[in-house]
Image (cartoon, rainbow, N blue to C red):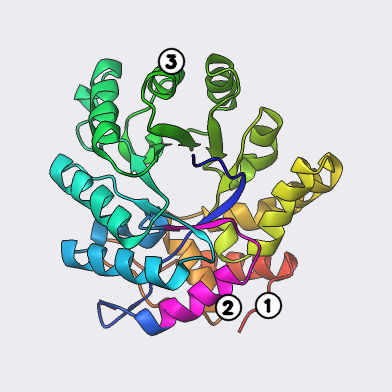
Amino acid sequence: MFDLKGIYCPIATPFIDDKIAYDKLDENLDFWISSKLEGIVVMGSNGEFVSLRESEKEELIRHCCKRIAGKKRVVVGTGSNCFDETLHLCNFSKECGADAVLLVTPFYYKGSMKDDVLEEYFTAVADRSPLPVILYNIQGRTGVNIAPETIAYLFNNVENIVAVKEASGNISQVAKIMQLTDGKIDLYSGNDDQVVPILSLGGSGVISVLSNVAPRKTHDMVQKFLDGDVAGSREIQLRALPLIDALFCEVNPIPVKAALNLMGKEVGPLRLPLTEMEPQNQERLAKAMKDFGIKLA
């Protein structure tokens, strides 16, 4: 059962000359692996999964699973608007040694994604997936919200659905999910500015953009709370807010790739249609990083 509390880092994919830069990826994986993270998420939003070719997805999954094996847990983002591709990536991730899959709500078809359709879709994937499924609710990206009642139904009735990454930003919705599941679901915050509030409702941790650039402090924020040091956890949460705001002042992963480059991690440019960060926003980001104690290159 996928029930480990803590921090999972959705990693950025480095590009050089429009190809995945595996040497830079390995350097960055060593950085994340050496921190106190519980796991790595491959092909999340940070990884620009919607811009990866099918062959690149397989190469990236295989490479990361081999590199991380036995050191951290590996979660793979397998969601897409192609049902067969989603199932293929779930099975391929299992073959490569991943521990779980992160399944985003289908996007683009928002008008047809009613509660009963979502129940049917997620059930169909989970019943066929050889790995535990973490639902990913992010209405701001997909145009579709998974209602608390739907999440509770899926958790209570589909054995292979074990957790949810909640990025709706709606704390009342988080509370409702926990109430409807008797607090048994592993609920991970998908918003770095709401980690402590979600932990207070019984959350299990965070799948965190912030952890790309400040993995140890992100870990400490969660661990302090779980250890009963709520004041210490809250202090990190509040002190991190300017940096979190800067990391989300443009569409993700534009700021986090800029931040990693500022640290000398050399993740390269973004793939179109994403473009580089506005200069004034990059200045704001650099200042917030310095203020949070992050050393720039």
* Amino acid of disc 3: Glu
- Pick whichever of labels 1 and 3 is earlier in the sequence: 3
Residue for point 43% across, 24% down: 155
Between residue 182 and residue 280, name the one nearer to us: 182
Is 26 magenta? The answer is yes
154 to 127, vertically: above or below: above
- Pick whichever of labels 1 and 2 is earlier in the sequence: 2
Q: Is residue 297 left or right of residue 240?
A: left
Q: Categorize mark 3 by other alpha carbons within 10 Å: few (<14), some (14-19), many (20+).
A: some
Residue 224, position in %: x, y? 79, 48
Residue 177, position in %: x, y? 52, 21
38 to 142, vertically: above or below: below
**What is the spatial separation of the Cα atoms under label 1 and label 3, in whole angstroms?**
44 Å
Q: Is residue 138 left or right of residue 106?
A: right
Residue 15, position in %: x, y? 33, 76
Residue corresponding to mark 3? 149
Residue corresponding to mark 1? 295
Q: Categorize mark 1 by other alpha carbons within 10 Å: few (<14), some (14-19), many (20+).
A: few
**What is the spatial separation of the Cα atoms under label 1 and label 2, in whole angstroms?**
7 Å
* Amino acid of disc 2: Met
Is mark 1 in CB contact (under 8 Å) with mark 2?
yes
Q: Quadrant of the C terminus?
A: bottom right
188 to 272, vertically: above or below: above
Residue for point 61% across, 38% down: 204
Question: Magenta residues, as a range?
Answer: 24-41
> In terms of secondary structure, where does tag 2 sit?
loop
- In this rendering, the label closer to the viewer, 3 or 2: 3
Residue corresponding to mark 2? 263
81 to 285, vertically: above or below: above
Q: Categorize mark 2 by other alpha carbons within 10 Å: few (<14), some (14-19), many (20+).
A: some
